[in-house]
Image: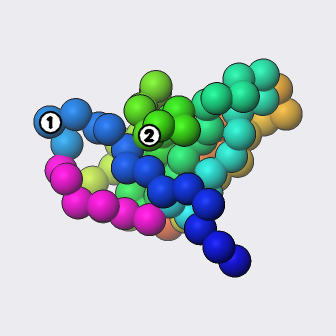
Amino acid sequence: QDCVLTFRLSLGSSHATAETSIHTLLPMPGTPDHFLAVNRTSTAHVVTLQGQVVRSFSSGKQQGGDFVCGTLSPQGKWAYCAAEDGKVY
């Protein structure tokens, strides 16, 4: 498989600059230029193709709350992220 696009999330200066790979990238239904980006942290983001963060969601846990997968409801109203602690946020 070839890489067709690479982008960095623009999280602002208050966040760490370490990069993590995105393991889930899903198009937001009804909003063609927005995507749910989930990586191995406790925060998932709604982003644009340019990498700008539109909205963020967090498990609120410092340890054990890193997301291992994510999905969206059919209309895109709800985001579900499963964490390494066995809970869905």
Task: Pick the residue in front: 89 or 3.
Answer: 3
Please tell me whether residue 19 belongs to the stretch shown in magenta: yes
49 relative to 54, above or below: below
Mark 2 crowd level (few <14, some 14–19, many ≥20, 10 Å Cα): some
Per the picture, the main secondary structure of the magenta-coloured stretch is loop
Tell me the residue at 71%/23% (across/down): 31
User: Which residue is the site of mark 2?
Assistant: 51
Q: Amino acid at mark 2?
A: Gly
Q: Residue at x 47, y 37 (%)?
A: 50
Residue name at image x 46 percent, y 27 percent: 55
Q: Which quarter of the figure has residue 65? A: bottom left
38 on left or right of 14:
right
The earlier-in-sequence mark between 2 and 1 is: 1
| Three-letter code for the amino acid on which mark 1 is drawn | Ser
Task: Give the structural element (helix, strand or loop) at label 1.
Answer: loop
Q: Nearer the viewer, residue 66 or 3?
A: 3
User: Which region shows up in magenta?
Assistant: 16-21
Look at mark 1 in the image and give the residue it sits on.
Answer: 13
Q: Are marks 2 and 1 in contact (CB under 8 Å)?
A: no
Residue 41 screen position, x and y as percent? 39, 57
Residue 60: percent from left, percent from top:
35, 42
The mark lying in front, picked from 2 and 1, is: 2
- Whether residue 37 is situated above or below residue 21 in the rendered picture: above
Please tell me whether residue 33 belongs to the stretch shown in magenta. no
